[in-house]
Image: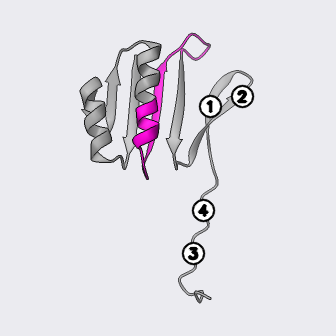
């Protein structure tokens, strides 16, 4: 089984994913495909995501029972901690001071 979650995805990518997978919520796609088909779909997502971001999670033979990958700008990223899959957060970008002059 696999799940793809998209944010800010272009309509052409959402349409493409809807051809292969069931969209159970806006931007959340599920299906059960082979490794080869999954990798092809993920390749399409990576090529078409544009300014958006996406994550894919699939069943895997490991301690956690799944694996995942991400593409696009997102604060969350995969971290391996002694063989355990974890998610870590990148630091938030510094907020711009509205009172600071632009020069």
Q: Which residue is mark 3?
A: 96
Residue nearest the viewer, comparing 41 with 74: 41
Query: Tag 1 or tag 4, which sits nearer the N-term?
Result: 1
Q: Which residue is mark 4?
A: 93
The quarter of the displayed image where residue 86 is located: top right
Q: Which residue is mark 1?
A: 86
Label 4 with label 1: CB-CB less than 8 Å: no
Q: What quarter of the picture does the N terminus occupy? A: top left
Residue span colored magenta: 43-65
Left or right position of 57 against 30: right
Q: Residues within 10 Å of mark 3 (few under 14, many from 20)?
A: few
Residue nearest the viewer, comparing 89 with 73: 73
Query: Is residue 100 one of those drawn in magenta?
Result: no
Real-space Cα separation, disc 1 to disc 3, in angstroms: 30 Å
Q: Residue at 37% of width from left, 50% of height from top? A: 8
Real-space Cα separation, disc 4 to disc 3, in angstroms: 9 Å
Residue sitting farthest toward the top: 61
Label 1 with label 2: CB-CB less than 8 Å: yes
Q: Residue at 47% of width from left, 35% of height from top? A: 55
Residue nearest the viewer, comparing 50 with 84: 50
Residue nearest the viewer, comparing 50 with 64: 50
Q: Residues within 10 Å of mark 4 (few under 14, many from 20)?
A: few
Q: Which residue is mark 2?
A: 81
């Amino acid at each position: 089984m696999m799940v793809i979650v998209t944010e800010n995805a272009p309509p052409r990518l959402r349409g493409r994913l809807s051809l292969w997978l069931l969209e159970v919520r806006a931007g959340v796609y599920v299906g059960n495909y082979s490794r080869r088909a999954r990798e092809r779909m993920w390749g399409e997502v990576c090529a078409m995501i544009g300014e958006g971001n996406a994550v894919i999670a699939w069943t895997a033979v490991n301690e956690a029972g799944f694996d995942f990958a991400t593409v696009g700008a997102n604060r969350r990223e995969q971290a391996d901690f002694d063989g355990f899959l974890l998610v870590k957060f990148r630091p938030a970008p510094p907020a711009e001071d509205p009172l600071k002059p632009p020069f």
